[in-house]
Image (spheres, rainbow, N blue to C red):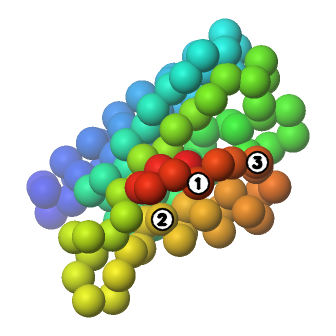
Amino acid sequence: MAARRLDKRLLDDFSRAATAVAAYVCARGGVGVIDLHGLTAAEALAVVGTLGVLGPGGGGRGGLLCLVTGVGHHSGPRGAVLRPTVRVLLDAAGVPYAAEAGAF
């Protein structure tokens, strides 16, 4: 039970930090990187969903936000999990992106 509370606090802190990076990039331009490695698909969706760049006017000044997902080498036999999950979210939100090896 204590481990779950710690996990929840860490995820909340990660989400706050990721949101701050996205807000800075949207407000001032430039480039921000959010590394989603180590998160589950559900956690990654929760984090990306809180960034504020998925809704109307979310792009701000046109900065670049790099979402690092990895390519799925450590996902086992079922293959990549984060990458296709994040791609579906970005597509559904109509967010333009460039797909690179292991990142958007």
Q: Residue 83 carries which label?
A: 2
In the image, 74 versus 7, the foreground residue is: 74
9 with respect to 54 (left or right):
left
Badge 3 density bin: few <14, some 14–19, many ≥20, Cα 10 Å = few
Q: What type is the residue that disc 1 sits on? A: Ala
> Would you place residue 4 above or below residue 51 in this image?
below
Type of the residue with mark 3: Pro
Q: Which residue is rendered at x = 35% and y = 82% of the image?
A: 79
Residue 14 vs 46, above or below: the answer is above
Asked if disc 2 and disc 1 are in contact, CB closer than 8 Å, the reply is no
Q: Is mark 1 on a helix, strand or loop?
A: loop
- Give percent across and percent down for residue 2: 12, 55
* Spatial CA span between label 2 and label 3: 15 Å
How far, Cα to Cα, is label 1 from label 3? 10 Å
* Residue that protrudes farthest toward the right in the picture: 56
The answer, for residue 86, to whether it is visible in the render is yes
Q: Mark 3 points at which residue?
A: 96
Label 2–label 3 contact, CB within 8 A: no
Q: Residue sitting at 67 percent across and 23 percent down?
A: 63
Residue 96 position, x and y percent, is 76, 48
Q: How crowded is mark 2: few (under 14 residues within 10 Å), some or many (20 or more)?
A: many
- In the picture as drawn, the residue positioned furthest to the bottom comes out as 77
Residue 72 in picture, x, y percent from top left: 33, 69
Residue at x 49%, y 45% (from the top left corner) = 67
Which residue does the numbered mark 1 point to in the structure image? Answer: 99
Q: Report crowding for label 1: few under 14, some 14 to 19, many 20 or more residues within 10 A (C-alpha).
A: few
Q: Are marks 1 and 3 in contact (CB under 8 Å)?
A: no
Residue 59 occupies quadrant = top right
* Sequence order check, earlier mark of 2 and 3: 2
Residue type at mark 2 is Arg
Q: Give the residue displayed 59% in from the left and 43% down from the top.
A: 50
